[in-house]
Image: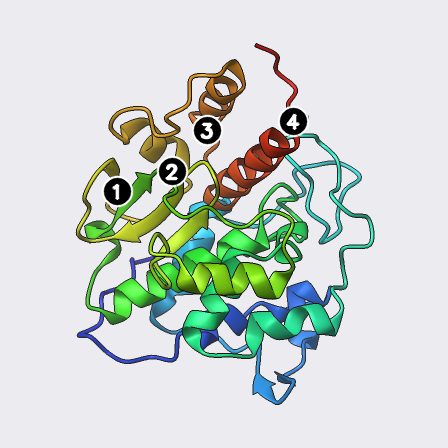
Amino acid sequence: MPMAEASDSTSVDLRRAYRHDVHKLRGRQHGSGRDALFGVPVNDSVPLQADRDAALLSRPVGEPEQTVANHATPARLSLLTGSVRADDAVPVQDAAIKPLIDGSPDELHAAWLTSETAALVNESVYCPYSSLKYHVLLVAALLDAYQAGQSFGELYLTVEPAADAPPRNADQKARQQAALDADAVDPHRTILWTEAMTMRLTASPDGPAAWLGPAPAESFADVWNRVSGSPLGREAQWWRHVDAQLRRIRSWSTALQYIEDAVAEDTRGTVGVSE
């Protein structure tokens, strides 16, 4: 299947990227999903093949097969612990979905970037360690790049220390506003924002960065290995363990979610590798 061509700076509604997988939040198949929720259109296809390309970053090509026996639900398995984060995660309550779909494009990006709810859902029941949260953020980043006239082969992953850390113990609205206010967050291009680091996709890298490659593929480990310097910038044994794991994880949404989970464990002081 050919790679998506970059557009000639065609304007598209970026909100479609953030709304296209609402049926997964509600535990539904695409064909049985609603067309609108809270008066806004949902579950529409994403233009410029951004959804397809993001899927190729995180899921195997071809006919899907169950990768974890006895787990075929939308509730995400944590690669860090091997367990489901929340048994009752799906379906997500409509009130928790609203900030993820109702707002301006920048507000929706900030909502997904800081969402704890979306992180509980996998991208595909066939890939239970994958993350719907990070799939959607990757879709939006690619769509923003493609509509700006940039092709996949022009993009780089940049990894930077988090100058503005997400607030701890804050509610969703406060986390969303913090992302909107943070200089470290680039609307639609930032795909990860944690206390340890931020990551974004760009065609004009500065600082530690690595080329994504010529075409979308399950390549996170390859890209992570190409990032110059020590991307994590932390020398504790726990973070050396995390770094080693990231050099093996190929699925992008799984890897990004693994980083978020690892940062959360470190913040809580419940890491599993001692000094």
Lower position in the chain sequence, tag 2 or tag 3: 2
| Residues at marks 3 and 1, CA–CA distance in whole angstroms | 17 Å
Lower position in the chain sequence, tag 2 or tag 1: 1
Amino acid marked by disc 1: Gly
> Which numbered circle lies on residue 219?
2
Q: Confirm or deny contact between disc 3 and disc 4 (CB under 8 A).
A: no
| Residues at marks 3 and 4, CA–CA distance in whole angstroms | 20 Å
- Give the residue pinned by disc 1: 213
Lower position in the chain sequence, tag 4 or tag 2: 2
Q: Confirm or deny contact between disc 2 and disc 1 (CB under 8 A).
A: yes
Q: Quadrant of residue 272?
A: top right
Residue 236: x, y in percent? Answer: 48, 16
Q: Nearer the viewer, mark 3 or mark 1?
A: 3
187 relative to 70, above or below = below
Residue 30: x, y in percent? Answer: 63, 70
190 relative to 48, above or below = above
Q: Is residue 1 visible?
A: yes
Q: At 60% from the left edge and 37% from the top edge, which residue is drawn?
A: 264
- Give the residue pinned by disc 4: 269
Q: At 42% from the left edge and 17% from the top edge, which residue is drawn?
A: 235
For the C terminus, the quadrant is top right
Lower position in the chain sequence, tag 3 or tag 1: 1
- Give the residue pinned by disc 3: 246
Q: Residues within 10 Å of mark 1 (few under 14, many from 20)?
A: some
Amino acid marked by disc 4: Gly
Amino acid marked by disc 3: Leu
| Residues at marks 4 and 2, CA–CA distance in whole angstroms | 30 Å
Q: Is residue 136 visible?
A: no
Q: Between 3 and 113, which is closer to the camera in this rendering?
A: 113
Q: Quadrant of residue 118?
A: bottom right
Q: Nearer the viewer, mark 4 or mark 2?
A: 4
Q: Secondary structure at mark 4?
A: loop
